[in-house]
Amino acid sequence: MIRAAIVGASGYTGGELLRLLLDHPQVEVVAATSRRHSGAYAYQVHPNLRRRTALKFISPESLGSADVLLLALPHGEAQHKIDELARLAPRIIDLSADFRLRNPQAYERWYGAPHAAPDWLSRFVYGLPELDREAIAGASHVSGVGCNAAATILALLPLARAGLIEPLGPVVVEVKVGSSEGGAEGNPGSHHPERSGVIRTFSAFGHRHTAEVIQAFGREDVSLTMTSVDTVRGALATAHVTVHSGLTSKDLWQAYREVTGAHVFLRLVKESRGVYRVPEPKILAGSNYADLGFEYDEANQHVVAMCAIDNLMKGAAGTAVQCLNLMHGWDETLGLTFPGLHPL
Amino acid sequence: MIRAAIVGASGYTGGELLRLLLDHPQVEVVAATSRRHSGAYAYQVHPNLRRRTALKFISPESLGSADVLLLALPHGEAQHKIDELARLAPRIIDLSADFRLRNPQAYERWYGAPHAAPDWLSRFVYGLPELDREAIAGASHVSGVGCNAAATILALLPLARAGLIEPLGPVVVEVKVGSSEGGAEGNPGSHHPERSGVIRTFSAFGHRHTAEVIQAFGREDVSLTMTSVDTVRGALATAHVTVHSGLTSKDLWQAYREVTGAHVFLRLVKESRGVYRVPEPKILAGSNYADLGFEYDEANQHVVAMCAIDNLMKGAAGTAVQCLNLMHGWDETLGLTFPGLHPL
Amino acid sequence: MIRAAIVGASGYTGGELLRLLLDHPQVEVVAATSRRHSGAYAYQVHPNLRRRTALKFISPESLGSADVLLLALPHGEAQHKIDELARLAPRIIDLSADFRLRNPQAYERWYGAPHAAPDWLSRFVYGLPELDREAIAGASHVSGVGCNAAATILALLPLARAGLIEPLGPVVVEVKVGSSEGGAEGNPGSHHPERSGVIRTFSAFGHRHTAEVIQAFGREDVSLTMTSVDTVRGALATAHVTVHSGLTSKDLWQAYREVTGAHVFLRLVKESRGVYRVPEPKILAGSNYADLGFEYDEANQHVVAMCAIDNLMKGAAGTAVQCLNLMHGWDETLGLTFPGLHPL
Amino acid sequence: MIRAAIVGASGYTGGELLRLLLDHPQVEVVAATSRRHSGAYAYQVHPNLRRRTALKFISPESLGSADVLLLALPHGEAQHKIDELARLAPRIIDLSADFRLRNPQAYERWYGAPHAAPDWLSRFVYGLPELDREAIAGASHVSGVGCNAAATILALLPLARAGLIEPLGPVVVEVKVGSSEGGAEGNPGSHHPERSGVIRTFSAFGHRHTAEVIQAFGREDVSLTMTSVDTVRGALATAHVTVHSGLTSKDLWQAYREVTGAHVFLRLVKESRGVYRVPEPKILAGSNYADLGFEYDEANQHVVAMCAIDNLMKGAAGTAVQCLNLMHGWDETLGLTFPGLHPL
């Protein structure tokens, strides 16, 4: 059993971390901080945890040492206290955007300000196990992933790994997302009468998660267009990719099977009958699976590559716990076995 | 053509009033005030009005005279400036809760503070035409209605008018409502991830609209239990009533036909086949209809009486325009002919 | 490890049973039947089970022996083959309505036809552990529960157990339910454009689950009014009850604490702040909790008693697995620890 | 006043036509056919029309002559009886897919079967007024539009009219749609528990509406990817377009202003503040507006061009009535002035 503390536990990602770790067979949650809800029972903020824990949120200042810290602070905070936090625990997983990029220039370009602790950037490993499981297993400091970045990277992964993508020509990615992605704080656009039933493109270009996709594949010509739709959890990334000429459908099947075969949380969904023929986030709520799929228009060398995730799980807390497992040499799926619900 | 001004036009009720009056054949909207959005185009707040009007919101202080003022201010404001407002126009329709009750004691009991202009209470007529059309037609000052009160009163109206209800024994009313009822300002509970998919009983007893039902029928033993569900517009009031012994289903049919026959916006919905057999708010969005229905358990003298409305129309702006029509001797349905959409 | 078979595994209840038993530490699922989907992989019908099981549905005729059968057949089927099924396994849990009532006359009254195996009625125990845990623990044949009955019974349980309810006067119960309650087969009213956003009272009187409530408490004057709202999972039962005069709020608190203290899956939700102050099904999806709450209008001796559940879990498959645990002397919560998600 | 008959009036498009024409100042609806619901009151199928019309559906065989026929039959039916129908009325507007394409080969390619009345194809004008208002005004036979085609064509129209699009390189269009697009008949995927909350890409390539886009702009390299989301009405087409190098944002503004200035139902939505900054179908329910918007990534010559519509209005019945108006020399907006609701 290791002693874990969650820093910033009152947001949606923090709450999901708490839920997962409370049921994790190798973890004891020794503390959970919340500046705003300090002193409150965790279940008063995360009502699903009622009767599951008597934990009370403590103030960030009261945080003591632990074996691992999981940081779920608002973006921009962790980089200012990383030295201080690093003294409290030998291992840190930071779910914010602060340590996802390796390059300080890239950080400044996408986040609009210089990084406050640029030296730390190289000490963090990007926390998507499907990109580099070994690096995470050997790391003491791991970042989280942007949920839309994770969905996009995983959508592209089979094609990229197999080297099927044309080097030139834009990769157009449309991501459709639920409302939990915006976090636990309301805003005028998240007020239910304004948010219900929307198909709202809130970012056509320049979404910050794009930087993670560029970093993952080393190509700049990727655009993410983000559209909010009426669900709470879930994201579907749809990437439009030009592949090499002469490829057959069989080549693509093989590329997908290779990748989904190598990673326990990736599933290929490509059915010819039934209701659920393609990846859909709807059935993934609470699950750590990323469902992949593709369609191929051979005449135009055009592949539509899809990835569906629960943005709070595979796109945030689930992947973080997966990294936690890898960092400790445990089975990758420990505490992550909930399969999702049908119907929901 | 009369000159109308809307005071407090940036909320949901104000926006609905604006939409209705812009298309009203006998009305010219000469001003619309908004303290918060003063200077903005109306369509920037109410995006459905883009290209429909070049009207800009003005500050409340800039308001000049008009033939009629429609007040859609937050509750508690109009009573403090009613004298001042009354000097600007000979006719006022106040959609807030300020002038709905005739009795200052009742106001204080339900609203928790003494009324600021108790003398004005008797000068206002309660603005539900189906209760007293003549009084409204002859009035210069008319109140709006509470949306849940309107739905409840109309649900009970056929039984009450026909004298079928037992004088003793509680009238239990369950009202299920959409999120627009909470108004245009967000709160933690209206944040989409928290509000989506809810079945949330936010008030078991003591909802203020109860006072209007008590006033309408002169009996105190009425309780309203309010539950939020996942829709934006719409309210369904379901009243559980004990009726006199010996009544037949035919007696009830007759009571309903009498009332729905006498009021152009009341419809009896009681089908034995098809999807839409009972009143449902879903098909009433944008419509001023109130759909009534009932079921009768003769063995227990128990009637379930239902009324479905669009809370922003028949429950607010629609009924106000209906009153406006009556006050000017116009056809009651002027500007209120949109029938609602199917499907939606 | 016991060997369990699910009979009728392609519906929503059957799928939920399958999900639960696949992760149950003491159960091996040896067969799952589906007439319609015989030969298909379970995950083709229940897409959340992809990669979780290679189980294929078999035809009902191929079913062999097992330690326990869980029947999730359409209502009316199990009673016609109960003798045959009973030969296959010493223990049966039947989730249909066929063996919930003890009295054949009651069955005929509520289901409109004589029971096909009336002798079996007395051999089944009604499967709601909170009503009689001991009886279930000692039984070989246990029925499931009607989801609305379960919610209603649990809403009333604290008041009934403490003897606080007036013997005369109707108990009016309003139940608001999601669409999964209607089962996996579509109908014109479940077509998304017709079902989305509804507040649809599909049964004002006479819902068959009423019979279970009457049986549980031995009083006839209970009415259930059923209203569909826009969610997939979840039911909220709101019971309007007249309690003895002179009761204080404290008396009620004590009654609730007694019952929620005695049953691990019952929680009292009654907060004075935060978003989640009362029982809400929204946060219970996938969980076996039943959340109870109450509000008290002392002046009118009127209690509003609430119970929120996931209709497919505590209202169906969850309670069945809870019974399975009790019948085998295992911890009641085995395989039922998923706490639900927030937000969702 | 002209005499209009609706053929196939029980579907969603037919119902919307009926709603519009019943309120149209120049039209008398003399008949509405429905094979399935023959003899039923129109309001029993379209419940929003209760008290608005005493019209009963007649069987197709009973249809007599009229001044204009509006055909809302399932795809593939009108082409088999067009001669017969043409004898009943001098003017026909066919809302099905049967007469949208000019080229019989294109029809066969996209619809998988030879056209049954190829000679008629050249006698119909494609019924999107924004493409060729004059042709429609002078036509006796006009087709409807595919809703996704209409949204896509209008999204691209400003760029195409101004000649800003690069001739080579794919035009990738992602269309997000509501459930009413699937029509009034249910299917397993439209069952509410399966359809609620989805982000479901039901067609990655080859959607038939693509043919109309290709026909409109004369380029083949257009792909439509269709994704269902949780709303009933509404479609948002997002087109990814490579434009000529050297274009400035100003050039694009001008192109959009030119087109939205020339067409009364097109609005440019591009705000820098507020909730509704981009086109959104949510506020368009019941309205005939098509809201256009764009974002420009100058570095990559990449334009994201958006168009939001109500698929049953601008995407079907609304545009058909607009054509009807043009064909009779009436104001284009007659009967089409409902602006949509906010909030909804």
Image (cartoon, coloured by chain):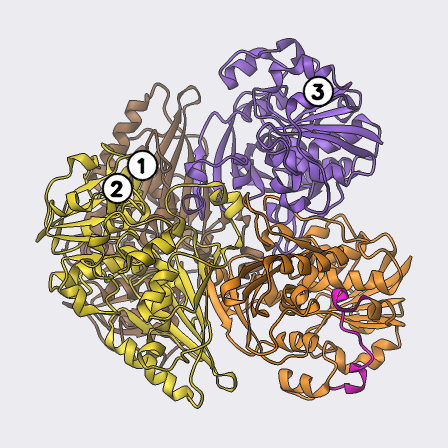
Chain colours: A yellow, B purple, C brown, D orange
For mark 1, give the secondary structure: loop
Label 3 with label 1: CB-CB less than 8 Å = no
Q: Is residue D320 left or right of residue C6?
A: right
C314 vs B115: above or below: below
Label 2 with label 3: CB-CB less than 8 Å = no
> Which residue of the protein is positioned furthest toward the bottom in this rendering?
A246
A99 vs A186: above or below: below
Separation of residues labelled 2 and 1 (CA atoms):
9 Å
For the point 30% across and 39% down, the residue is A45
Label 2 with label 1: CB-CB less than 8 Å = yes
Q: Which residue is mark 2?
A: A50
Q: Report in which chain the residue with disc 1 lies.
A: C
Q: Which residue is mark 1?
A: C269
The amino acid on which the numbered mark 1 sits, given as a three-letter code, is Val
Q: Is residue B286 left or right of residue A110?
A: right
Q: Which residue is mark 3?
A: B125
